Image (spheres, rainbow, N blue to C red):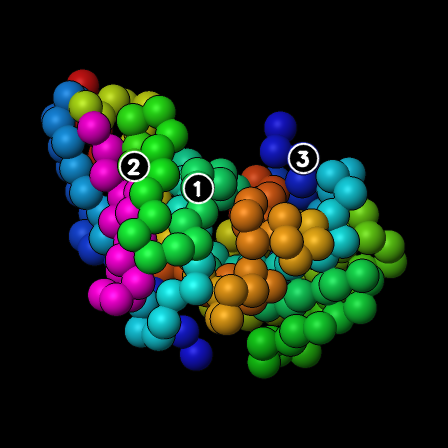
Amino acid sequence: SQELEQSPQSLIVQEGKNLTINCTSSKTLYGLYWYKQKYGEGLIFLMMLQKGGEEKSHEKITAKLDEKKQQSSLHITASQPSHAGIYLCGAGPSGSARQLTFGSGTQLTVLP
Amino acid sequence: ETGVTQTPRHLVMGMTNKKSLKCEQHLGHNAMYWYKQSAKKPLELMFVYSLEERVENNSVPSRFSPECPNSSHLFLHLHTLQPEDSALYLCASSQDQARRQLYGYTFGSGTRLTVV
């Protein structure tokens, strides 16, 4: 089965700083989803990357997919307290999202 | 409002109780999922329903029993649970395969279950 490892597990940054979260897969990535979760809440879809080299941005959050490295990175520019939460990456086998497997998540704290 | 509603938000139950978790979506999606989220662990896929038919059961103990009466509703029936079953239970839904690949799942806010 596919396993996703996220790093770091937790991150504390000062407001205004940039940060990067990584997600590495044990198998070939056919598509990679990024979600954000507030503590005790459901997951909110951020973006999905499908092709190697693909890069997408949503407000100040940018995600990239490196198929060769079986890795994706999520970069936040000029972080704000509203960015705080748990970021999870998810992937499915063979391009199907039917059985999304998720990483353990990265807990982000942004200090005002 | 995410479009997927889960009730109750919080549930405390004894090990001998029987309770049910409810999930409802009116997004027109045709697949629904139950996930379990425990502290410090990845989300665990429990059950997948596609077009009201169970297509995935990831070795979940029989004390968890899902039910999908129609494409808009999903239940998780609980009985004789153990304290280690305490977790956040998340429901999700998705559309046909092409849209699912683009947009992934829509998640509910979850039910925080505590077994005492």
Q: Which residue is mark 3?
A: B3
Disc 2 crowd, CA 10 A, few/some/many (<14, 14-19, 20+): some
Labelled disc at residue A62: 2
Q: Who's the residue at 74% across and 48% down the image?
A: B29
The quadrant of the picture occupied by the N terminus of chain A is: bottom left
Where is residue B27? Give x, y as percent.
74, 39
Region rendered in magenta? A63-77
The earlier-in-sequence mark between 1 and 2 is 1
Residue A71: say if magenta: yes
Helix, strand or loop at disc 2?
strand
Of all chains, the one bearing label 2 is A
Q: Can you tell which mark lies on residue A47?
A: 1
Residue that protrudes farthest toward the right in the picture? B69
Q: What's the chain of the residue with tag 1? A: A
Q: Is residue B85 visible?
A: no
For the residues labelled 3 and 1, the Cα–Cα distance comes to 18 Å
